[in-house]
Amino acid sequence: MNLTRALIGGLAFSAASVCAAAAQDAPPAPPPKPDVKTVEDWQVRCYPIQSAAPCDMLQEQGDQQSGRKILSISISYVPSMDRHALIVTVPLEVSLAKGVTVQTDSYTSPTMKYRTCTRDGCFVQTAVDNALVESVAKSTGDGKVNVVGDDGKTYAIKFSLKGFAQAHDDMVAQAKAKATKPAQAGAAPAPAQH
């Protein structure tokens, strides 16, 4: 199984719930509400679901003038794989071919490609090395997500690193405590005890 697909499949619960609910004719059941803990400028969210990655850490930035969301960063951890997944959402009107980079005072990611766009924005969904997360956790000040607009100009959207390391440690600890192990493909069921 493709690692990125496995990670993203386990991590996109809230987005999938919203999309599935919107596609139904009957009034949708609301998705389960997560337990949310604020750690400085980050939120740690854990959903009451059976999942290989039930928790993430999230930060959203909005445009003060329009009130519109301009950046969302979600980082999840899959204990069974000891890997992280990153979901970055930016506004529409970006150059899809140029992708995005995440940059801090000590780290610049490789260019990450957009996976999809909806009316809510364009999304990067990818598995990331633990080294990326560890590097960001050691950084100070602000980070930025660099995007190229469809006008060809590069824009740096700032996000705060305040509380990042603590939020990450809390999210990983909760994910390890609450995650379910994925079923082994092709594994024989355990014999029934009589």
Image (spheres, rainbow, N blue to C red):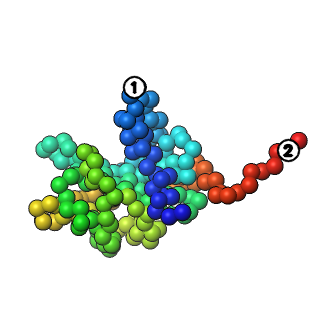
Question: Count the marks: how many?
Answer: 2
What crowding class fits label 1: few (fewer than 14 Cα within 10 Å), some (14-19), or many (20 or more)? few
Residue shown at 64% from the left, 58% from the top: 185
Q: Earlier in the sequence, mark 1 or mark 2?
A: 1
User: Which quadrant of the figure has residue 142?
Assistant: bottom left
Q: Which quadrant of the figure contains the N terminus?
A: bottom right
Q: For this rendering, which residue is in front, 56 or 105?
A: 56
- Using residue 98 as the reference point, say whether residue 2 is left or right of it: right
Element type where label 2 sits in the image: loop
Disc 2 marks which amino acid? Gln
Q: Which quadrant of the figure contains the C terminus?
A: top right
Give me the C-alpha separation between circle 1 and circle 2.
43 Å
Mark number displayed over residue 27: 1
Residue shown at 55% from the left, 52% from the top: 52
Q: Which residue is mark 2?
A: 193
Element type where label 1 sits in the image: loop
Image location (x, y in percent) of residue 121: 26, 50
- Using residue 79 as the reference point, say whether residue 45 is left or right of it: left
Q: For this rendering, which residue is in front, 191 or 67?
A: 191
User: Which quadrant of the figure has residue 28?
Assistant: top left
Image location (x, y in percent) of residue 111: 30, 70
Q: Is residue 80 visible?
A: yes
Disc 1 marks which amino acid? Pro
Mark number displayed over residue 4: none
Residue ranking furthest to the top:
27
Image location (x, y in percent) of residue 114: 30, 60
Image location (x, y in percent) of residue 173: 54, 54
